[in-house]
Image: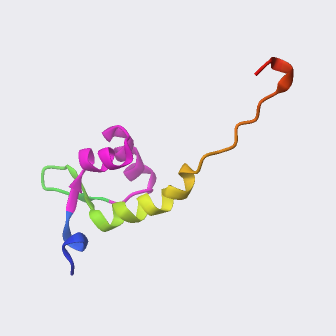
Amino acid sequence: MSPVDQRLLTSGEVAAMFRVNPKTVTRWVKTGRLTSIRTPGGKHRFRERDVIALLDQTAGDARPRPVHHDPRDGH
């Protein structure tokens, strides 16, 4: 296994990668969007490869969307 396959990330590290609040990461675990490993202390840890896969999957969601202006409202 490569180091990326073995590396575990904290909720804070995952949140920073996605630019979201760590509570959002916890919500993703609850909804099944992201899987985690629980430490003996009850903290979530995330396989880096799983996080990277989710980043790749959501990258398509970040495409710019066209903005439609209504000439009737002056904008």
Residue 59 placement (x, y as % from top left): 49, 56
The residue at 44%/56% (across/down) is 33
Q: Inspect the magenta stretch and tell me whether residue 17 lies in it.
A: yes
Q: Nearer the viewer, residue 63 or 25?
A: 63
Total marks in image: 0
- The chief SS type of the magenta part is helix
Q: Nearer the viewer, residue 57 or 32?
A: 57
Image quadrant in which the N terminus is located = bottom left
Residue 48 placement (x, y as % from top left): 28, 63
19 vs 5, left or right, is: right
The residue at 40%/65% (across/down) is 53
- How was this image coloured? rainbow
The residue at 58%/51% (across/down) is 63
Write down the quadrant of residue 72 in the picture: top right
Q: Nearer the viewer, residue 4 or 33?
A: 4
The residue at 84%/25% (across/down) is 71
User: Which residue in the rendered view is the most extreme toward the top?
Assistant: 74
Write down the quadrant of residue 69 in the picture: top right
Magenta span of residues: 8-35
Residue 43 placement (x, y as % from top left): 20, 49
Q: Is residue 64 above or below residue 71?
A: below
Image quadrant in which the C terminus is located = top right
Write down the quadrant of residue 46 in the picture: bottom left
Residue 22 placement (x, y as % from top left): 31, 40
Q: Inspect the magenta stretch and tell me whether residue 28 lies in it.
A: yes
User: Which residue in the rendered view is the most extreme toward the right?
Assistant: 72
User: Which residue in the rendered view is the most extreme toward the left?
Assistant: 40
